[in-house]
Amino acid sequence: MLTNKKGFTLIELMIVVAIIGILAAVAIPAYSGYTKRAKASEVTNAMGSVVASANEYFSDRGEWPADINTFDGIRDSLGVTFPQTYVSAIAWSQADQELTVTIDNTELDLSSAGGADCDITLEGEEATRGVWGGTCAATYIPRN
């Protein structure tokens, strides 16, 4: 007697659902980490542009820009648009040629302990690549 079975058994469907669940459990945290790193690199790329532009401004004019401690000051003085979405504060030290950006933890949690806002700093003297540092988790700070 020939029977023609069509469809999947319950066991086969449960195995497929279990495999999808395992893949999702691995993929979702990895995706979250990738998006955080992408957002952090958006900020660090802008920081590099600000420091390079500030050094160029100083080389051309012999003085530092008047107000690059605000987003509008950076845009007006240097022509660099800084991403404000994740940043709560920005500070420029003329003496050290250091740019410090505070990442807002409510918008983007880059802290290793979780909870507190963290800083990313870039000290960029003329003729150097710059030295990165800060209190954010090391995963999100560029290597020197």
Image (cartoon, grey):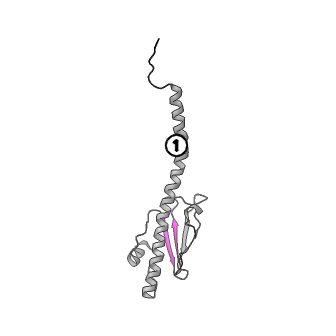
Kindly state the secondary structure of the residue where label 1 is placed. helix
Residue 31 drawn at (x, y percent):
51, 51
Q: Residue at x 41, y 76 (%)?
A: 73
Quarter holding the C terminus?
Answer: bottom right
Q: Is residue 6 above or below residue 29?
A: above
Q: Is residue 20 visible?
A: yes
Q: In the figure, residue 142 lies in which quadrant? A: bottom right
Task: Report x, y in % for residue 97.
Answer: 53, 79
Q: Amino acid at mark 1?
A: Ala
In the rendered structure, which segment of residues is drawn in magenta? 82-111
Query: In the displayed structure, does residue 54 sit left or right of residue 118?
Result: left
- Residue corresponding to mark 1: 24
Q: Residue 100 in magenta?
A: yes
Exactly how many numbered labels are in the figure?
A: 1
137 left or right of 91?
Answer: right
Residue 83 x %, y %? 43, 66
- Residue 117 position (above or below residue 90): above
Q: Residues within 10 Å of mark 1 (few under 14, many from 20)?
A: few
Q: Which residue occupies the extreme top position in the image?
A: 1
Residue furthest to the front: 1
Work out whether residue 109 or residue 37 is closer to the camera in this orientation and state it.
Answer: 37
Taking 71 as reference, is 33 above or below it?
Answer: above
Residue at (47, 68) in percent of width and height: 45
The one of 10 and 104 positioned closer to us in this rendering: 10
In magenta segment, residue 89: yes
**Can residue 137 be seen here?**
no
Where does the image place residue 108, in percent across and percent down from the top left? 50, 59
Farthest right residue? 113
Residue visible at 53% across and 58% down?
109
